[in-house]
Image (tube, rainbow, N blue to C red):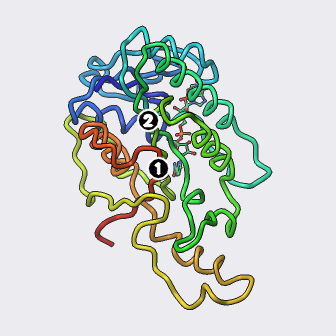
Amino acid sequence: MKVLLVGATGNLGIRLVPALLTHGHSVVAFVRSSEKLESLLPQSVYRQVAVVEGNATDSAAIKKAILDTSCDAVVNTAGLAALPPWGKSDLPNIFRAVLDGVSEAGTERERPLRAWFLGGLGVLHFPGSESMLSNYIPIYLAHRQNLRLLQSLRPDALDWSLLCPSDMIPESSDFGVPTKISRARLAANATTPPLWNDSWIRYVPLIGRTVLCAMNAGRYVTTLEQNAEFIASDLESNGGQWSRKTVGVINSVE
Ligand SMILES: NC(=O)c1ccc[n+]([C@@H]2O[C@H](COP(=O)([O-])OP(=O)(O)OC[C@H]3O[C@@H](n4cnc5c(N)ncnc54)[C@H](OP(=O)(O)O)[C@@H]3O)[C@@H](O)[C@H]2O)c1
């Protein structure tokens, strides 16, 4: 696929460049600074990427980039959610603008685009309930409003998925192609976290579910490379397994 990668200079974005190329995609990087992207990537990789400079809060620029370069898919990693509920970040503005740009581009070309967005573990449901994990540990709340925006879209406007990792740590700073990942592939699940460890503790009044969330949270740390590989490989298979879903991930070998 030809993929518009918004936020290619970030922690996840920079690892998505080689992952997407390794899976046979063409990459159009949408960044604020092409110099920054060039400084981060090996020359041999940078040469394989088309670059569009722009601001991700500008929906018209996103739409134009998609239509001008004939992209079929978008991955948005731009913007970073604030941790505390009172924290401020550009993510909500970026998310809305990218969503508008991608949806409008789909309408104009009369075919919805495939798109991966980034959320967080907190928008997944507590297993066996309809309640989000962030109801028990209220952090990174911007992802909740972003998910509401996705869910309010007409089904024919966009074929979206929301990847909801917990902390992602770097595995290496080698951004060569093909990628070399030393860790196992991720196990994934829609709507609720995969391989959740349940316990009687959930039944403790008032604090039970919060304690259980805290006990599970550390198990969901993955690497940036694993998540980049997950998205790149899904776009290659184009199977529709994760369409219009939130997706939780965990190391398949703990
Ligand atoms: N890192 C984690 O552990 C983690 C865990 C769960 C979820 N997430 C979510 O995953 C996403 C990616 O995380 P990350 O760690 O890769 O974030 P990051 O390293 O902070 O990268 C953010 C990217 O957004 C770009 N950006 C910011 N404002 C922009 C704008 N107005 N226009 C264009 N680009 C803009 C930045 O570009 P510049 O280089 O120009 O600043 C950078 O490339 C975030 O939404 C985050 O909330 C992250």
Q: In which quarter of the image is residue 183?
A: bottom left
Pick the front one: 55 or 174: 55
Callout 1–callout 2 Cβ contact below 8 Å: no
Left or right of 139, for residue 129: left
The percent position of residue 219, horizontal first and vertical second, equals 45, 71
Pick the front one: 237 or 3: 237
Tell me: residue 152, above or below residue 169. above
User: Which comes before the other along the chain, label 1 or label 2?
Assistant: 2
Residue 109's label in the rendered image is none
The percent position of residue 82, horizontal first and vertical second, equals 68, 47
- Look at the numbered disc 2 and say if its residue's Cβ is closer than 8 Å to ligand 1: no
Say which amino acid is labelled 2.
Asp
Residue at image location 50% in from the left, 70% down from the top: 218
Tell me: residue 9, above or below residue 149. above
Q: How many labels, in total?
A: 2
Q: Write down which quadrant ligand 1 falls in.
A: top right
Tell me: residue 231, above or below residue 205. above
Q: How crowded is mark 1: few (under 14 residues within 10 Å), some or many (20 or more)?
A: some
Which residue is identified by label 1? Answer: 245
Which residue is identified by label 2? Answer: 159
The kind of secondary structure element at disc 1 is strand
Residue at image location 46% in from the left, 21% down from the top: 106
Say which amino acid is labelled 1.
Lys
Pick the front one: 248 or 21: 248
Most extreme residue toward the right is 86
**Image quadrant for the C terminus?**
bottom left
Most extreme residue toward the top is 68
Residue at image location 34% in from the left, 32% down from the top: 17
The percent position of residue 112, horizontal first and vertical second, equals 43, 26
The kind of secondary structure element at disc 2 is strand
Q: How crowded is mark 2: few (under 14 residues within 10 Å), some or many (20 or more)?
A: many
**Image quadrant for the N terminus?**
top left
